């Protein structure tokens, strides 16, 4: 994925198992790495940080690949599932990209931007 001159190598999560696991249990993520979540249709997506050890920025993209929301998600070790913070998309989305927390702000990513995927 390329956005505002920044290039990321993305793992793709498309199977139900990959979508459920995401970046759980990872102790680190390279600065130029991330994960692309691909859903079958566009709807309000919601993520949480269950068993996720590193803070992440999440970019929600609509069916055309335009960013509709950006949020920073924080680990919550030891918090019961029922009490974990949910991070719903502000608008319907079909894709989500997780990268290290702070990179979206650092590189000026904004709602309305459209990353290029190769």
Image (cartoon, rainbow, N blue to C red):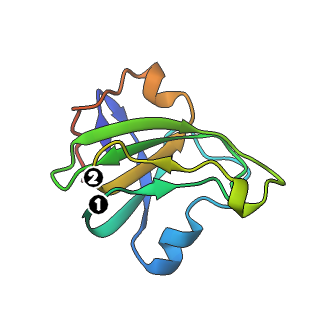
Which residue is rendered at x = 50% and y = 43% of the image? 99
Q: How far apart are marks 1 and 2 (CA)?
A: 4 Å
Mark 1 is surrounded, within 10 Å at the Cα level, by few (under 14), some (14 to 19) or many (20 or more) other residues, namely some
Question: Label 2 belongs to which residue?
Answer: 92
In this rendering, position of residue 9 left or right of residue 110: right
Furthest residue in direction bottom, as rendered: 16
Indicate the position of residue 84 as horizontal and vertical percent values. Answer: 68, 53
Task: Answer with the quarter of the image where residue 66 lies.
Answer: top left
Which residue is rendered at x = 68% and y = 59% of the image? 50
| Residue 116 seen in the figure | yes
Which residue is rendered at x = 29% and y = 48% of the image? 61
Furthest residue in direction right, as rendered: 78
Task: Answer with the quarter of the image where residue 108 lies.
Answer: top left
Of residue 108 and residue 68, the one placed in the foreground of this image is: 68
The answer to whether the residues at label 1 and label 2 have Cβ atoms under 8 Å apart is: yes
Check the image and report above or below for 6 versus 37: above
Task: Answer with the quarter of the image where residue 116 lies.
Answer: top left
Furthest residue in direction left, as rendered: 64
Indicate the position of residue 46 as horizontal and vertical percent values. Answer: 46, 55
Of residue 118 and residue 81, the one placed in the foreground of this image is: 81
Which residue is rendered at x = 74% and y = 51% of the image? 27
Mark 2 is surrounded, within 10 Å at the Cα level, by few (under 14), some (14 to 19) or many (20 or more) other residues, namely some
The dot on residue 88 is none
Of residue 32 and residue 47, the one placed in the foreground of this image is: 47
Of residue 33 and residue 98, the one placed in the foreground of this image is: 98
Indicate the position of residue 112 as horizontal and vertical percent values. Answer: 21, 32
In this rendering, position of residue 8 left or right of residue 115: right
Question: Label 1 belongs to which residue?
Answer: 43
**Which secondary structure, mark 2?**
loop
């Amino acid at each position: 994925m390329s956005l505002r001159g920044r290039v990321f190598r993305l793992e793709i999560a498309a199977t139900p198992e990959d979508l459920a696991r995401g970046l759980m249990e990872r102790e680190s993520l390279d600065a130029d790495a991330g994960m692309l979540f691909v859903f079958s249709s566009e709807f309000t997506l919601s993520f949480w940080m269950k068993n996720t050890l590193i803070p992440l920025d999440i970019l929600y993209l609509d069916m055309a690949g335009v960013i509709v929301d950006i949020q920073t998600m924080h680990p919550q070790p030891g918090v019961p599932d029922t009490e974990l913070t949910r991070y719903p998309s502000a608008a319907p989305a079909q894709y989500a990209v997780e990268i290290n927390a702070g990179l979206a702000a650092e590189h000026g990513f904004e709602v309305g931007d459209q990353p290029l995927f190769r």
